[in-house]
Image: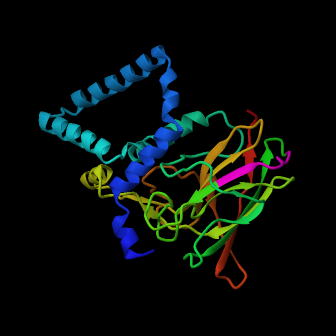
Amino acid sequence: MTDTTTEQATAAASGAAATEQFRNRIAPAAAGSDTERVDTLVTALLTATHDIIRRHKVTYEEYNALKAWLIQVGQDGEWPLFLDVWVEHVVEEVAGESREGSKGTIEGPYYVPDAPALPAEATLPMREDEAGTPLLFKGQVTAVDGTPLPVAKVEIWQADDDGFYSQFAPNLPEWNLRGTVTADETGHFKIHTIQPAPYQIPTDGACGSLISAAGWHPWRPAHLHLKVSAPGYQLVTTQLYFTGGEYVDNDIASAVKPELILDPTPTGNGNDHEVTYDFVLDRA
C-alpha cells in the first residue's frame, strides 16, 4: 500500500462511499414502515434519552456539544459507520436469537453487492503483488440436519494486509479481495486469498472524535466477511476471526463470538495458512 493511498483514505471519503452504498441498497425499503411500530420505537428511544439526561444531569454545554457532534457525523457521512460499529451487534443478536445454524454477526459498512462470480474453488481478485500471508479458506454449506446444500452462494469480502477495503480507499482495484463463490454439488468450496490484517476504523471524522473523547481504541481484529445463502434457507451474514489475533478480545464493534474464531494451520513451507469452516443454514 502506498503512502498516497494511506493519506487519501480519509473518513470523509470512506463515509461518503458507505452512505451512498447504503442508500442505493437498503434505504428505500424503509418507506413502508408501520406507523404504530415507529411510534413505539421512537418513543422508547426518546424516553431512554430523557432518562440519561436526568440521571447524569446533562448540562447545556454537553447538550450543545452533542448537537454539534451529531451534525458533524452527518456532514462526514459517518452514520453507517457509527451505527454499524456501536449499534448493529445488538440488532444482529436479536435477529439471530432463534437460529439453530451458524452464528451470524454484523455486516459492517463495507459490503458491496454483486461481487464477481467465482467457481467452487477460486482465487479472490487481487493485485499481482498482493501483500499478506496466503490463506486457503475451505468448508461446506449444509442444512441443520446435515444435508449438503449444492451450489450455495458464499459472498466474501475483506481488508487487505494494510487494513483497507476496495471501493472505500483509493488506488485499489474495484473488486480487490471480493467475490461471490458458488459451492459445488456437495456444498463444498475452496477460496484462495490472503490473511487480512486488523484495521483501524476512520479516526479523522466525527467517530474518531468520539473515540478520542471517550478514551477508546479504534481497532477491529482481522476478519473475513461472509454472506452465505441457498434457495429455501435463511441467509447468514457473519465474520470469521483468527485465534490469537490482536483485538479479538476487545473489538471496538463488539462483534466477535467464540464460535467465529478460526485456528489457522501452517501448510506447505509453513508460510501459507489454511482454515476450515462449515456453514449450517436454517430453513427460511
Q: Main secondary structure of the magenta part?
A: loop
* Front one among 262 and 234: 234
Magenta-drawn stretch contains 16: no
For the point 84% across and 49% down, which residue is it? 150
Residue 122 at what x, y percent from top left?
Answer: 73, 65
Q: Is residue 24 above or below residue 254?
A: above
The residue shown at (73%, 49%) is: 153
Q: Residue furthest bottom?
A: 269
Nearest the eye: 98 or 118: 118
Residue 136, image quadrant: bottom right
Q: Which residues are magenta?
A: 147-155
In magenta segment, residue 151? yes
Q: Residue 16: where, in percent of width, then height?
A: 38, 49
Q: Would residue 10 be found to the left or right of residue 126 on screen?
A: left
Residue 8, horizontal then vertical, whole percent: 35, 65
Tell whether 121 sits left or right of 28.
right
Q: Where is 24 relative to 161, above or below?
A: above
Quadrant of image for the C terminus:
top right
Give the quadrant of the N terminus.
Answer: bottom left
Total numbered labels: 0
**Which residue sits furthest top?**
36
Left or right of 244, for residue 232: right
Q: Residue at x 50, y 40 (%)?
A: 24
